[in-house]
Image (cartoon, rainbow, N blue to C red):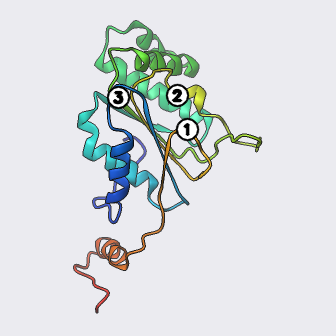
Amino acid sequence: MPGSTRVETLVGRDDSIKKICEVLQHDGSRKTAVVHGLGGMGKTQLALAYASRYGKKYSAVFWMNSKDVDTLKQSYATTAERIYCDHPLLVNLKTAAEDSDLEKATGAVKIWLSNPQNDHWLIIYDNYDTPKLPGRDDAGTFDIRPFLPDADHGAILITTRSSQLELGRRIPVKKLQNIEHSLEILSHASGRVKLSSSR
């Protein structure tokens, strides 16, 4: 996953991963899960953990940095290059990969994802923290919908700080409530083993 580093152990988030699995359960139709919560709650790590555990059940997994429009377009260009490396006979992807036209790359990837024979991919749109919401037109916000594949199939996982984003089933990520989970994280970070609240 370019630009993202996965922690070795994800603590206290098994229920959230289970919910993502339930929402993205493949049945031939498009599924969208929106993981939302405050900054630092582990949304990106949760998406990385899901991709690491279940990525092999998908035909392809793509990671899109969605912090702003330009960065998202660049992620599409990188994805076009990757797809072309795996499928060198796809001429439109070759052109998109070789050109510096980000719009063309975005369009070519969306076309590839929309192919009915290509229905079991996963795209993770990470850090979509500035969504354009109904009734609001704040500077720097943008609508991610034009960037989503036009397909009625595939799996989409979005991470965002916004609890108001209504693009799929919302999965909230909250602070860890169990002190043992907090101590387990501290144990991993410090290299000390078996820290316990009873000490």
Q: Identify which residue is drawn at 55% across, 60% down.
A: 38
For residue 167, the mark is 1
Between circles 2 and 1, the one closer to the viewer is 1
The answer for how far apart the CA atoms under marks 2 and 3 are is: 13 Å
For residue 121, the mark is 3
Q: Which residue is mark 2?
A: 148
The answer for how far apart the CA atoms under marks 2 and 1 are is: 10 Å
Q: Identify which residue is drawn at 39% across, 42% down.
A: 23
Left or right, 43 with respect to 6, comes to: right
The amino acid type of the residue labelled 2 equals Leu
For residue 30, the mark is none
Q: Position of residue 196 (x, y in %)?
A: 28, 85
Mark 1 is surrounded, within 10 Å at the Cα level, by few (under 14), some (14 to 19) or many (20 or more) other residues, namely some
Q: Earlier in the sequence, mark 2 or mark 1?
A: 2
The front one of 81 and 8 is 8
Dot 3: element = strand
Q: Quadrant of residue 101?
A: top right
The amino acid type of the residue labelled 3 equals Trp
Q: Earlier in the sequence, mark 2 or mark 3?
A: 3
Left or right, 39 with respect to 181, comes to: right
Dot 1: element = loop
Left or right, 156 with respect to 132, comes to: left
Between circles 3 and 1, the one closer to the viewer is 1
The front one of 7 and 134 is 134
Q: Position of residue 28 (x, y in %)?
A: 34, 25
Q: Position of residue 128 (x, y in %)?
A: 56, 44
The answer for how far apart the CA atoms under marks 3 and 1 are is: 18 Å
Compared to residue 14, the image places residue 64 above or below, namely above
Pointers 2 and 1 in contact (C-beta within 8 Å): yes
Mark 2 is surrounded, within 10 Å at the Cα level, by few (under 14), some (14 to 19) or many (20 or more) other residues, namely few
Q: Identify which residue is drawn at 30% across, 74% down.
A: 184
